[in-house]
Image (spheres, rainbow, N blue to C red):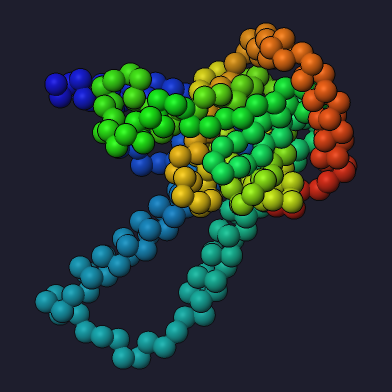
Amino acid sequence: MLMASVSAFAAPAAEPSSPHPWQLNMREGVTHSSRMAYEAHMVALWICVVIGVVVFGAMFYAMFKFRKSKGAVPAVSFTHSTKLEIVWTVVPVVLLIGMAWPATAKLIAMYDTRNAEMTIKVTGYQWMWKYEYLGEGVEYTSRLARTSEDIRQSGEVPSFANADQRNYLLEVDNMLVVPVDTKIRFVITADDVIHAWWVPSLGWKQDAIPGIINEAWTDIDTPGIYRGQCAELCGKDHGFMPIVVKAVSKVEYQKWLAEQKAKHPTTSAAAAQATAVDAMKASPEGIAPRQPATP
């Protein structure tokens, strides 16, 4: 029974870049942006580790070497050391510049949505998401899957040993399907209150604000399913507003896109004309992002 429980708990980690038991560090992610954020994080982490080792090493050495039981006495004539003051001023400045310079370059790259191969408009609602593939005439909503909603409303305790309930509150009725190895631009807004579209494996989070269009981009390099959540308190069902991104090959994506257009040919044609206008309005040259994505 114990092994079954462990297997059930570990099973979701089979998805690319998923969190796993006892994970302490941030995930590397599956996009260029997420890896840039991870690299900046690791540089800062190791600098902090070195500083911690030096500072605590010096502190414990002084406590052990110059303790009273060894006959140590306080230095009464010590005032200051100009050399030390220069060192502990210059070294932190150099470290900060050393971290800030590459981090700034990474941030600039993470905010550059130009040269995208496709654009997806994301609109937040209480409590679901709407996805529009601008210029393609494909749009649909995505909300908490019925299986999770039924369990939530019934008050039943989900069983993670049950495959149908393993991703309780994490499944949606319609995933966001995107191609891999493609620079995808997102234009993000909301219809009612402030939301935030966040998928950790993509390496960024973007606020969805009514009346404002924010931008972000991604380029997933590994096919798989990536889960996220609304990351801004948006009302009583804020915790039941999951995001699921399904990354597939370019061939699979084109097949899926054709299937979506075939389902609603009239709607797709009308929507294509409307979204073409939206795409023009929301182009990098038309509307500048009011708020950059948060890594």
Q: Nearer the viewer, residue 256 or 226?
A: 256
Q: Residue furthest left?
A: 69
Q: Is residue 265 left or right of residue 101?
A: right
In this rendering, is residue 253 above or below 235? Answer: above
Question: Image quadrant of residue 260?
Answer: top right
Q: Nearer the viewer, residue 279 or 234?
A: 234
Q: Residue furthest front?
A: 154
Q: Is residue 66 left or right of residue 167?
A: left
Q: Nearer the viewer, residue 288 or 81?
A: 288
Q: Residue furthest bottom?
A: 76
Question: Image quadrant of residue 186?
Answer: top right
Residue at 35% from the left image edge and 91% from the top image edge: 77
Q: Position of residue 138 (x, y in %)?
A: 72, 22
Q: Position of residue 283 (x, y in %)?
A: 84, 38
Q: Position of residue 244 (x, y in %)?
A: 52, 29
Q: Position of residue 204 (x, y in %)?
A: 59, 41
Residue at 21% from the left image edge and 84% from the top image edge: 73
Report if residue 139 is visible in the image.
yes
Residue at 14% from the left image edge and 21% from the top image edge: 1
Residue at 75% from the left image edge and 41% from the top image edge: 112
